Image (cartoon, grey):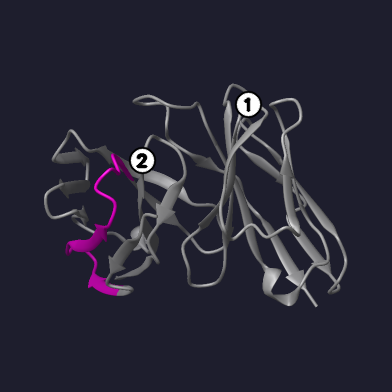
Amino acid sequence: DTGVSQDPRHKITKRGQNVTFRCDPISEHNRLYWYRQTLGQGPEFLTYFQNEAQLEKSRLLSDRFSAERPKGSFSTLEIQRTEQGDSAMYLCASSLGAGTGRETQYFGPGTRLLVL
Amino acid sequence: GENVEQHPSTLSVQEGDSAVIKCTYSDSASNYFPWYKQELGKRPQLIIDIRSNVGEKKDQRIAVTLNKTAKHFSLHITETQPEDSAVYFCAASWGYQKVTFGIGTKLQVIP
C-alpha cells in the first residue's frame, strides 16, 4: 500500500497519560499535515511540515501538543497529559507541495483517540 | 483566518435525482477549493477540486462551480446512486497550505 499510513489506528488512554501517534506519508510527498476531527465536524488543521520544517501551527495546538518530522519523512504527534477533550480522530495528510496539481492532500486512515 | 460555511447539513434525495451542496468562504485570498467525500469510518477522499482561475469543473456526474466575487462555491452531483451516500466536505485553502473545512453535509440517496 503506497498511501498515507498511521499507527496506531485506535488508542485508549487514561486522563493524564502521554500518547504518541505516527504518520508515514506517501514517499515522494514533502508536505505533511495533521488535522483533528470530532464527531459531526470537518477536520480542523493542527500543523504542517515542509520537509522537516514545521511551518505553521494552529491556535488549537496547545503546549501539550508537539509534532516532529525529524528527517522529513515520517512524523509523530505527541499529546502530553491527555484530557477528555482530546478525544477525537487524528488525521494525517500529505501532498507533493506548492504548485498547480501538487497541492492535493491525501489523507491517512486516522488514529482514533479515546481519553477516559 | 479562513472560515468556510456549508449547507445543508443533511440532504436526502431519491436515487437518480441531483444533489447540490453550497459553501461560502471568507478569505478572498483563498485560491484552491477541494471537495472531499468521507464514508463512515473511512478517511476523507478527494473527489474534485477547483482553482480560483476557473469558474467551473466537471468530472462525470460531479461538477463544481466557483463564484469568486460572491465567495461561493457549490458541488453538484447528478444521477445520484446509493453509493454516493456519505458525508461531503467543502474546503478552502490559500497558497496550497492548510485547508479549512466546512462542517460537512450528510448525503443520503434513497433507492
Examine the rendered structure and indicate whether residue B77 appears above or below residue A106: below
Give me the residue at 38% from left, 35% from top.
B95
Q: Does the magenta stretch include residue B87?
A: no
Q: Mark 2 points at which residue?
A: B94
Give yes or no for residue B31 being in the magenta stretch.
Answer: yes
Give the residue displayed 62% in from the left and 30% down from the top.
A2
Q: What residue type is labelled 2?
A: Trp
Which chain does tag 1 point to? A
Q: Identify the amino acid type marked 1.
A: Asn
Residue B108, quarter of picture: bottom left
Is B92 positioned to the left or the right of A75 in the image? left
Residue A63 in the image: state x and y as whole percent: 73, 58
Q: Quadrant of the C terminus of chain B?
A: bottom left
- List the residue tagged with mark 1: A51
Q: Quadrant of the N terminus of chain B?
A: bottom left
Q: Nearer the viewer, residue A62 or B58?
A: A62
Query: Badge 2 sits on which subunit?
Result: B
Asked if the residue at tag 1 contacts the one at tag 2, i.e. Cβ–Cβ closer than 8 Å, the answer is no
Q: Is residue B30 or residue A113 the one in the foreground?
A: B30
Of residue B46 and residue A23, the one placed in the foreground of this image is A23
Which range of residues does the magenta coloring cover?
B11-33
Query: Is residue B97 toward the left or the right of residue B21 in the image?
Result: right
Tell me which residue sits at (57%, 26%) in the image.
A29
